[in-house]
Image: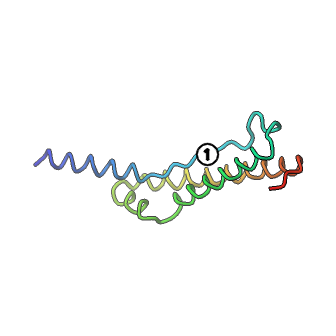
Amino acid sequence: MKLNLRIGLALASALALSACVSPDVVTKTQVGDAKLTCTEIEVQLNQLEDIREEAKKGKSMSGENIAAALLFWPAVIGNHSNAKQALEAANERHEVLVALAERKRCKL
């Protein structure tokens, strides 16, 4: 019986941790920004949209976040904090890339 309980707890913990959202937190500026081509700028802007979408999942009341809250409530706090940080960083990076695109007269 104790073995089944331990296995159940291990599976529940694994499920809770797998529900955690951890979007990338990008840096505002990067080495080599000045050398980016218009195409590379556009690719990075598209990647930022993916990061934003992932971050929004971490801030929402999705089924995964509710499951994490029920099984391991500190995960919700971590999800929300990381998602907020990732969203802010993506917005700052977006501003840098848009300004760079304008300087290079890119048509995005």
Tell me the element at label 1: loop
Q: Name the residue at 70% across, 54% down.
A: 91
50 displayed left or right of 36: left
Residue found at the very far top of the displayed protein: 31
Disc tally is 1
Residue 54 appears at what percent x and percent y?
Answer: 55, 55
Q: Name the residue at 75% across, 33% down.
A: 31
Q: Name the residue at 84% across, 55% down.
A: 107
* Residue located beneath label 1 in the image: 25
Q: Quadrant of residue 63?
A: bottom left
38 displayed left or right of 89: right
The colour scheme applied to this rendered structure is rainbow
Q: Name the residue at 89% across, 48% down.
A: 103
Q: In the image, what residue type sits under mark 1? A: Val
Residue 52 appears at what percent x and percent y?
Answer: 62, 56
**Image quarter (top left, top right, bottom left or bottom right) of the C terminus:** bottom right
Residue closest to the eye, 23 or 82: 23
Task: Judge whether 34 appears above or below 11 on screen.
Answer: above
Residue 78 appears at what percent x and percent y?
Answer: 49, 51
84 displayed left or right of 107: left
